Amino acid sequence: MAEKKLLGQMLLEEGLITEEELKEALEVQRKTGHFLGRILVDLGYVEERDLKRALSIQAGVEMIDLKNTPIDRRSIEAFPSALAKTYNVIPVKLERDVLTLAVGDTLSLNIQDDISFILGYKTKMVLADENDIKEAIEVHYGKEIETTDDLIKWLAKDIEEMEELESIASQGEYATITSLEEIASLPPVVKLFDLILLQTVRDNASDLHLEPFEDDFRVRYRVDGVLYDLVHPPKGLAFALFCRFKIMAGMDIAERRLPQDGRIELSIMGRAVDLRINTVPTVFGECLAVRVLDRAKTIFELENLGLSPTNMEKIENIITKPNGIILATGPTGCGKTTTLYAILRKLNTPDVKVITTEDPVEYMLEGAIQVPIKERIGLTFGRCLRSILRQDPDIILVGEVRDFETAQMAIQSSLTGHIVLSTLHTNDAPSTIMRLIDMQVEPFLLASTIEGVIAQRLVRVLCPRCKEEYIPSKTELLELHLSEEKASSMKFFKPIGCSFCRGGYKGRTALFEILVPTEPFWRAIIERRPLGEIRKVAIEECGMKTLLDDGLEKINEGITSVEEIIKEIHGY
C-alpha cells in the first residue's frame, strides 16, 4: 500500500506553492495549531478549489461539481433538513440503501458512520465546493436556519412512547429499574445521545452539561472556555437521556439522591473519546456534567503550547536537570496537566522509567506507568507516592500537591535523585512558594528542590480569517498597564466573526509565567518579605516574564485580543 503523501508535498509537486511559502505556512501552523491547507488559503498562496482537489486526491475521495450534478429528489426526502443545515451536507442520490452525500471538506468525512447510524442508511461521501453545498441546501430545504432542537423534533415526531416517557419522568425515584432501562434503549433516545455527543466532539467542546430547571431542561457545552446552549429537549426525552448516560457509564440508574461518578469510552467521528460523567442531585432533579477528553485532539508537544522562544528555552533548561521539582500552577482548567504531559513526553525515553499518579488519570502516555488515586479506599497521593518510590522510577508525576504529606513525599523524592512533576492551585508563580510554606514545608527544603514554577492561563485565539486590526481605547490600554507611547509600536487585532469561527475566535493558547528561582529570590522568601516585593525580585533577579508580558506579546503577534488578556489578568 502506497504511503499517503503530505499535503504540503503534493502542493509543491503540482507547482501551486513555493518552498518559501510552505515554510512560512508551517511556521504559522507551529504557532497557531491550525490546519496547513487553511493557512495556505488564508495567506493567499492557494485557491480554495485547488486545495479541495488536493485534499480529495489525498483522501482518495471523489470530487464532484455540484452545480452540474443532478440531485435525486428521493435523497432529499430521506435526509432531514436539520441534519443538512447542522453539518452543511447535501444528499446527492439514493441508490437502493446507499445514500451519497456531498461534504465541503475532508474533516467532514468522519461523520459518515454517525449519519449512517442516525438514518439507518449506508452512506458514501463525495467532496464538493462549500458554497455550492450552501446554495443547494437553500434551494432544496429553504433558507430558514434550523438548529439541533429541530433535529430533536424530527427524531421524536413519530414516537408513540413520548407520553410514556413523560409519565415515567414524573415518577422520579419511584420509577422501576426495568422501565428506566427500557426508555434508555428507545431508538430516539439512543439517536439523541449520539447526536449530542457528535455535536460536542465536532465542535471540540471540553465539557457538556445537562441541567434541569422547573420549567426547562437545558443542554450546554463549553467551547474554548465559553458555555453555549446546545439543545432544550422535552422533559421526558431529557430524563431518558440521563438514563442513557448513566447506563453507558456503569452508574446506578436507580440512585438519584446521591452524587455519582462514571466513565464512558467511545469512538466518535473516528476519534477515541473518554467521557468522565458526574451527577449531583438538585431541587429539580439530577444535574449531569460530562468532561470530554479527546485523545486524538490532544497533542502533547511543548512546541504546540504557545511558549515564546524565551520561555521555551527556560523550560528546556529546567527539564535537563537530573533531579528536582517542577510545578505547574493556575486555576482549574488552565491546561496545567497538558503542560506537564508535554514535558513528560519530552523526557519519556526508553532508558528512563516514568510513573504517574493522578485523580483521575486523564490521558494515556505510551511507556508510562499510570496509577489512579482512589481516596475512598485510602489510596491518597501521599500513600501512592510512598509506594511508587519502591518501584525505582526516574521521573514521577503527582497529579496535585494537596497537603503537607504529599509535599513532603515530593521533596523527599526529589532529594533522592528523582524528577518530580506536579500541580498546585495558585494565582501566579511566586505565590506558589508561599502556598507550600503555608503547608508547613520548610523554606530551606524548597530552595534545595524547586527547579521551576510554571504559572499559566488559557486565552482564546483570534480567527485568522476574520480578525481585524484596530486602535485600542485609552480604557483598554489602562487595563493592560500600557502607555500610549509603547502601544504606538504595537499591533492590535479584534474579533469580527465568520462562518469558520465562533464569535471571532478559533481554539485556545496559553499564557505563561515561568519562575526559575535564584539565590536573591530564596533570600527574600526566607526573610518573609511581602508578596509584592517577592514578585519584584522574581522579575528583576530571576528574569521572570509575567503573564501580562506574555499576553502583550501575543496581542502584538495577532494571536489573541485585548479583551481576552484583560479577562485573564484583570487585577493581577
Image (cartoon, rainbow, N blue to C red):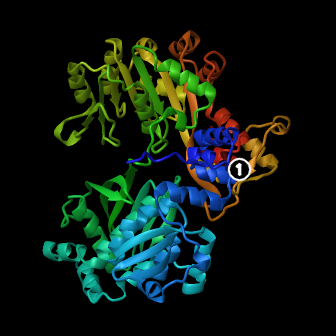
Q: Quadrant of residue 142?
A: bottom right
Q: What quarter of the picture does the C terminus occupy?
A: top right
Q: For this rendering, which residue is in front, 64 or 132?
A: 64
Q: Quadrant of residue 54?
A: bottom right
Q: For this rendering, which residue is in front, 142 or 420?
A: 142
- Could you tell me the amino acid type at mark 1? Leu
Crowding at label 1, few (<14), some or many (≥20) Cα neighbours within 10 Å? some
Residue that badge 1 annotates = 43
| Position of residue 195 in the picture relative to residue 359 (left or right) | right
| Position of residue 147 in the picture relative to residue 565 (left or right) | left
- Residue 64 locus on image (x, y percent): 55, 71
Q: Residue at x 82, y 34 (%)?
A: 486
Q: Is residue 463 visible?
A: yes
For numbered disc 1, what is the local secondary structure? Answer: loop
Against 543, is 4 above or below?
Answer: below
Against 132, is 467 above or below?
Answer: above
Q: Quadrant of residue 531?
A: top right
Q: Residue at x 43, y 79 (%)?
A: 151
| Position of residue 148 in the picture relative to residue 506 (left or right) | left
- Residue 3 locus on image (x, y percent): 43, 45
Q: Is residue 284 visible?
A: no
Q: For this rendering, which residue is in front, 458 or 217?
A: 458
Q: Residue at x 48, y 86 (%)?
A: 72
- Residue 354 locus on image (x, y percent): 31, 26
- Residue 314 locus on image (x, y percent): 56, 22
Q: Residue at x 58, y 45 (%)?
A: 8
